[in-house]
Amino acid sequence: MVGRNRVWNVAWWWLASLTMCAALVVTGAKASAGEQPKPPPPPTPWDGWYNRAVGGVLIDQRGMLENATVDALGELRSARAKSLQAAPSAELKRFVQLRKISLKKLDAQLQRHVQSGDKLPDEVRFLAGLQQIRYIFVDPKNHDIVLAGPAEGWKLDAKGNLVGATTGRPVLLLDDLLVALRSAEQALRETISCSIDPTPEGLNRLRAHVAKLERMGDPQQTAAGIEQALGPQRISITGVPAESHFARTLVAADYRMKRLGMNFEPAPIKGLPSYLHLLDASGRGLSAMLPRWWLAPEYQALLRDAEGLSWELRGSSVKVLAEEDFLGPAGQRAGTAKAGRAAAQWADNMTRHYEQLALADPVFGQVRNCADLAVVGALIAHENLLAKAGCELPTMLDPAALPTPRLPAPQQVPSQVSMLKKNDRWVISASGGVKIDLRTIIQKVELAEKLETVRKEAELGVHDDWWWN
């Protein structure tokens, strides 16, 4: 048996990630000898940003993920810095608690750029610097829907993430809003989620491989053998297109969470030791539990006025949840709905530090942004808000009118082993992911008279531009 002569603790887990917020780089496959390279695609309004995409990860054309190097992140930031436009006015640059965006007028703005073939200006692609959605106003008089939330000008951080100029919070993206609106019906039916899981075949190979080990031997060789036996792990995405930036953001957050939990890199903030460092000296063997973590947005009850024309998203945050799977004799996994002490402790600790972590590693803030936009899409679809407003969004709702960037979909990730000299046991981190259960979120609603005052102060229909403070 493993550990007969030496006492080791082995922890392995499956990597994955991406988001515009932590710099994911898409690598192109080289043409083979004699093969003519494919001509570049025609220019689109998105050129200059999404050609190298999301989250501290490299994704090749096969959909395989690996961690990005410092050089790759530097190249990404340099490329983005060259194309980045400053906020064009002092009003757009300054921080405000509520910046309002007219979806009707934004749609008209998009239509003009599509017809002219011009690249979208950054103020459009970055939704006038919005960092959060707090209110949704339905405006039947002007046949409009207005989104409102805190906003300011933008900048790039050291890793190429787009963040607020003074707050450091990640900025909402037009691309993600379009995906949320266009995917709303599907997302309400099946939930938005991503998950990274070992294959049953890989788990069977791992069990057979471990059974043959007489002793740990050389740690590096043992780790390599475990990684080879387990093989690549699968990435599954539901509710939104797998080729979208939105989907890659979810995978990125899962990836970053696992890298922190399994001690592949130190947390960028204090007070968040890895899961491995929380383990005590007791425990069970390989056939015992497999810690599993996932991220889920958390809101207080949504507020609405009596007519359903004003909505407020409250208490937007993200919670880290944990449970444990049991690895059966045939390599299958079964959820227990329980979490071990260390796994639960790590999840609770990350939840407490989430706000701080989202500033240090913006991919976690981008997940919260995506959740806000998904709630907007769900409310518009579920409450039939476009019909209430008499509002049409022909460009925003039609993928043929303005396609969103299609990026190589994340499909698999190599297994990686981390080893600590602790006790005679194997600790296995079994996947995880992100889950946005929109039906649960939009079903918790309370009436609030105060929204009438907020609505009046929003000055709906007064301004000519598509955004105003």
Image (cartoon, grey):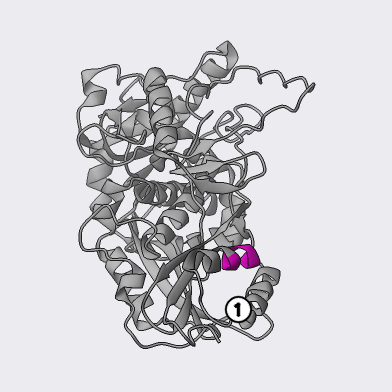
**Which portion, as a residue range, is magenta?**
225-230
Can residue 138 be seen in this snapshot? no
Q: Is residue 372 located in the magenta-colored stretch of the structure?
A: no
Residue 230 image offset from top left, x and y in percent: 62, 67
Q: Amino acid at mark 1?
A: Val
Residue 339 left/right relative to 192: left
Based on the displayed image, in which of its 4 quarters is residue 196 positioned?
bottom right
Question: Toward the viewer: 199 or 10?
Answer: 10
| Residue found 21% across the figure and 39% down from its top | 167
Q: Using the image, determine if residue 200 lies above or below residue 308.
A: below
Instruction: Tell me if mark 1 has few (under 14), some (14-19) or many (20+) residues whose alpha carbon lies within 10 angstroms of its own.
Output: some
Residue pictured at 66% horizontal, 21% vertical = 41
Percent x, y for residue 272?
26, 63
Q: Is residue 441 visible?
A: yes
Using the image, determine if residue 415 lies above or below residue 394: below
Residue 128 image point, x, y percent: 34, 29
Quadrant holding the C terminus? top left
